[in-house]
Image (cartoon, helix red, strand yellow):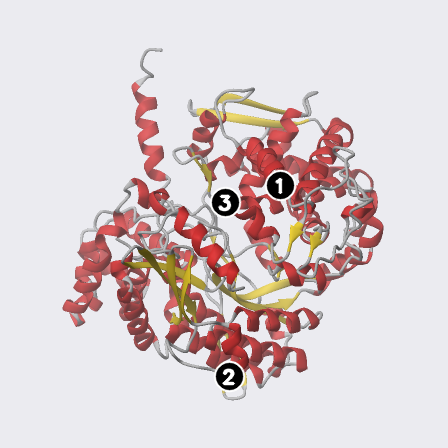
Amino acid sequence: GGLPPAGFLGLRLIMVDSQYYLPNDIGVSALDCGEAFRLLSPKEQLYAHYLSRASWYGGLVVLLQTSPEATSIYVLLQRLFRKQTPVQLESVAAAAGLGPEEYQAFLVYASGLYANMGNYKSFGDTKFIPNLPKFKDLVWHSKAFQDSPSEVEALWNDCSHLLYSLETKQKQLGLGDKGITTYFSGNCGLEDAELAQRFLDSKNLSAYNTRLFKTKPVGEKRCYEVRLASAVKKGGYCTVDCEQDTPCGTYEFEDAVFTVCRGDYAPLMEKVSQNLEKAKAYAANENQKRMLEEYIKSFTFGSVNAHKEGSRFWIKDKGPIVESYIGFIESYRDPFGSRGEFEGFVAVVNKAMSARFARLVSSAEVLLPELPWPQAFEKDRFLKPDFTSLDVLTFAGSGIPAGINIPNYDDIRQTEGFKNVSLGNVLAVAYTTQKEKLTFLEENNKDTYIKWKGPSFEVQVGLHELLGHGSGKLFVQDEKENFNFDQNSVRNPETGELISSWYRGSETWDSKFSTIASSYEECRAECVGLYLCLNKQVLSIFGHEGEEAEEVVYINWLNMVRAGLLGLEFYTPESKSWRQAHMQARFVILRVLLEAGEGLVTLSETTGADGCPDAVIGLDRNKIHTVGKTAIQKFLCKLQVHKSTADVEGGRTLYEGYSAVTSDGSHDFLKLRETVLLRKEARKMFVQANTKVKGETVELLEYEGSAAGLIQSFTERFSEDAEELETHLLELSSHDASCWC
């Protein structure tokens, strides 16, 4: 084999490192919602304001859910910027010997910490560290340090080692030796997570608002603490119905002892509840009031059932002007896949885009039968989700998605429905790319791609959220032995045999398919989008006819295969694991379409103009409606059948087979991954507005789309109680500090 040229070796080393820095030229965009906010009535503005406050306070929980050091880093940065704005700190930085590039790297790191609510990327779960060695010099020259040297030094000592550390385990989130997590104490592994899940299931307790701490064993028995997020601490009793709902206490289970207690993140949960209480006075209707009451109960006492109840009222609140959702929602970042990360959002209706999505909803009954599975595999009746396009005012948590489909409670989704939200002002800025930054496409496709990326993505988001997540039936035999299908007639279309497996009792999609559930479901929804965007009726709903409609289809499919290649960034070869559900899903689709052959998709390794490895992906537009459609049709049917019939084994084999990243086979994906890392563009960060009550009105404070603007927005976000809040955060953080070692 001989040695590669020296330059290439050097490149490999730099590449591994730069993956853990945010680049100085990272895109930072302001989320514009001024117009939508000003169209609200004063009452709606106050409602939006207090929900935003609740969301921002709750969002701080994510620091505690991410890494042991995230909270100290956050508090350190808040202290620095409270005393000196980014502009004022610039002269301090110069005095401390930092050049302009280094100071920019400092601002970018701080922005990244705020935007991700922690020092791990919300999309991909890898750690990022400051791209400057002189961080400490800057801190020591700051006014914050001069005013309280011992406090700031203590903060620095608390986080400085982990701030920079890139030991193998610290490079990404994960369980046990695979990575860092604060959902579990450091002495927990997969076996502990599985045991705890069985225990929670036996008590009918949801894991969404919990963390698991393995404590000192008593004799032969392993001991665990299951901690529920709530404002009320240990032993605080609430009403009787809430007690039955949340069985606090100590239980023996298998060969272990579990103690269930309240009070995780208590001071933050209290702030959330207080602001929801204030919002209640401005609710538009009874459903909103009842929803808030249940949420308050949930965050006060740690009851997921109350949150479910609140979600039921939330679903009934159809098409509100001010939309919101708050709580422990998405489980992507729990390495075991069942604990929810806190998020809260407030958004305002975008009327034009919503009209197109509403037309899609009303065509659902005509479009669902087009999907490639037998009628028996479709829900008995399509529950029309409330799908709207909104402009985000506030999205607190670790990151902002382009669309959401909630609640995640499967039992509610199957019977009572759900809501779909497309976030229009996020879409508008998230996917804009300059031509020179557009990687892996043939030159002659780039202009078409840039022109049609937005419109095609809108079609894909609509189909994915609505007919993707909204379609397909789960076969269930409930606790009373009732079946929701006829077991004597429903056949598996893949084998022709009668169905032999289904969900029993309290089993759910998430509990059965656990670690692959969320990516598999994203893949199913993405396939529905690819499949149904070929339908002329769908395209005309979105205003695309004739040749334009064909461009939308072409770019939608091209974007999907390109995303599959880009997805390799989110694969970790050492642990053979995927760090991002949607990206794994897109890679799986790329594999399916490559396997279809006949020249539908071409993927070749090349050398770029800069002499470094590159790649080009191509798609034959004349084969989409034939070869492409057939391949997706077959694959989508398989995905649905395994899902409907609770066939975990078949589903895993299929999905993990296509998810495998290897160097053998038709393409060397491990080598391609390195090329992707070499040429990746960092995800944009968003700057969000603040709201402030002035007398009877609410003022919207907007900031510029830059690192300094993002930092300023966070400095002003908690101006009235910053110090109290930071004291609480540090207390919460130090309380568990010994658990992570």
Q: Which residue is mark 3?
A: 580
Task: Say which residue label 2 marks.
Answer: 239
Question: Callout 3: helix, strand or loop?
Answer: loop
Q: Quadrant of the N terminus?
A: top left
Residue most extreme to the top: 1
| Disc nearer the start of the sequence (3/2) | 2
The quarter of the picture where residue 324 lies is bottom right
Q: Is residue 401 above or below residue 621?
A: below
> Marks 2 and 1, how far apart in space?
57 Å
Residue 561, compared with residue 166, is above or below; it is: above
CA gap, disc 3 and disc 1: 25 Å
User: Where residue 376 appears, x then y in whole percent?
Assistant: 80, 47
Closer mark to the observer between disc 2 and disc 1 = 2
Depth check: give the residue in front, 10 or 166. 166
Q: Residue at x 42, y 47 (%)?
A: 125
> Mark 1 = which residue?
450
- Mark 1: which amino acid? Ile
